[in-house]
Image (cartoon, helix red, strand yellow):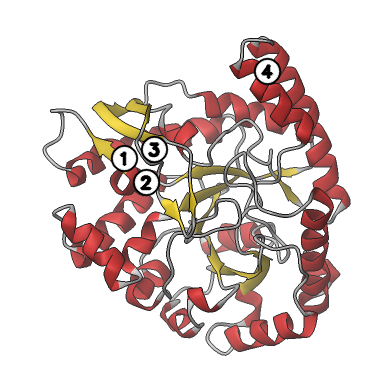
Amino acid sequence: MTTQTKKATQTRAPFKADHVGSFLRPARLKEARIKFQDGEISREELTAVENEEIKRLVEAQKANGIHGVTDGEFRRSWWHLDFLAGLDGVELYETPDGVRKFNAVQTRPVGIRVVGKVGYSGHHPFIDHFKSLKAIAGEGTTVKFTIPSPNLIFARAALETDAYEKHEDVYEDVTAAYNALIKDLYAAGCRYLQIDDTAWTSFFTEEERDRVRALGSDPDELIHKFAGAINGSIAGRPDDLLVTMHICRGNFRSQYFTSGGYERAGEVIFGGLDVDGLFLEFDDERSGGFEPLRFVNRPDLTVVLGLVTSKRPELEDEEAIKARIREAAEYIPLEQLALSPQCGFASTEEGNNLTEEEQWAKIRHVVKIAEDVWGKESR
């Protein structure tokens, strides 16, 4: 990207008050999904409800100060599985215990597996999801679209095919599939894309690194393949397509699945990815300190500090949040920082343990603090 174009893009997004993407599903939408699953309503009737609720959500985002609107992931059951199962060679299946145990909570018994050569055939339902969101949002509204990382195929998918000898062998095909799909998203009008990635937690603690070793990989080598998958997926993108990445330690019904700071992966995350922004969890001690920000080596990289939790309804002390922003600014310039909740409010359709009004209070809290720190005009 040219410096001139990148600067123009960075004044647009990530915004100083931003968000990760998912929102609590309204009761009406949950009821419609159950009726569809039970055969009581058609796909067309479910889509009509989704469209109406997404329209209300877009209006609510605007009313509460959000400039980059999403569809809240209202058409998904899972933030990642629905998308990944739309790729060739990948399918959903019922598992004995769910995806992973989240602290004291078990997920639904659903997972993904690779059953053939991974690819992108030129059609994916999420392309239509984006087009619908863009039409609902209307002209003049920045639309943010979220997809899971290609690294989730390695970290979360069972390998049940002769097409690949081991998990790492799938990277070349997955990266090519993502690159082609992202180009189609751009052709559909996408200009703000976020890649969500829980797989980087594989490098944060020794326990997680041992999980990698148990799969037959060296974590010190695999981390560079992770970066290569992200960079390869967005390689050759047009100058006006802004790409960010969100790194998460798990978000299911207000629970998490791991902890650990960014230190062991910081050099690659902050210095080896070709993204324009990073949405990072920093809402409690599980995420470690800001010291790894010293690895940021580009003046055009925006780090969005997830200092406001989406897992609990209580509002954080404003001055404490501002103090933490100042602390982060000791490592990189304040103008390269932004603020958001640490994760979405409903990574799955179950949602976190707070009400919709408490959700919007969190969003307004982020907006208010960002205005105080950077000024209204900066948003």
Q: CA distance from mark 4 to mark 1?
A: 29 Å
Give residue 277's quadrant in the image: bottom right
Separation (CA) of disc 2 from disc 4 = 30 Å
Sequence-wise, which precedes: disc 4 or disc 1? Answer: 4
Q: Which residue is mark 1?
A: 157
Residue depicted at x 22% and y 39%: 170
Could you give the CA–CA distance between mark 1 and mark 3, rounded to whole angstroms?
16 Å
Q: Residue at image x 47%, y 61%? A: 249
Q: Which residue is mark 2?
A: 152
Q: Amino acid at mark 2?
A: Leu
* Sequence-first disc among 2 and 1: 2
Answer yes or no: do the residues labelled 3 and 4 have beta carbons within 8 Å?
no
| Residue density around tag 3, few if under 14, some if 14–19, many if 20 or more, within 10 Å | many
Residue assigned mark 3: 178
What residue type is disc 4 on? Lys
How far apart in space, not on screen, are marks 3 and 4 (Cα)? 33 Å
Amino acid tagged 1: Ala
Q: Nearer the viewer, residue 214 or 338?
A: 214
The picture quadrant where one finds residue 72 is: top right
Dot placed on the residue nearer the N-terminal end, 1 or 3: 1
Q: Along the horizontal axis of the image, is 370 left or right of 98?
A: right
User: Which residue is found at the position 76% from the left and 68% from the top?
Assistant: 314
Residue 371 falls left or right of residue 147? right
Question: Which callout, 3 or 4, points at the residue further toward the start of the chain?
Answer: 4
Which numbered disc, 2 or 4, marks the residue that appears first in the sequence? 4
Question: Which residue is labeled 4 in the image?
Answer: 35
CB-based contact (under 8 Å), mark 2 and mark 4: no
Residue 78: horizontal and vertical position, in percent? Answer: 53, 38
Q: Position of residue 13 (x, y in %)?
A: 66, 57
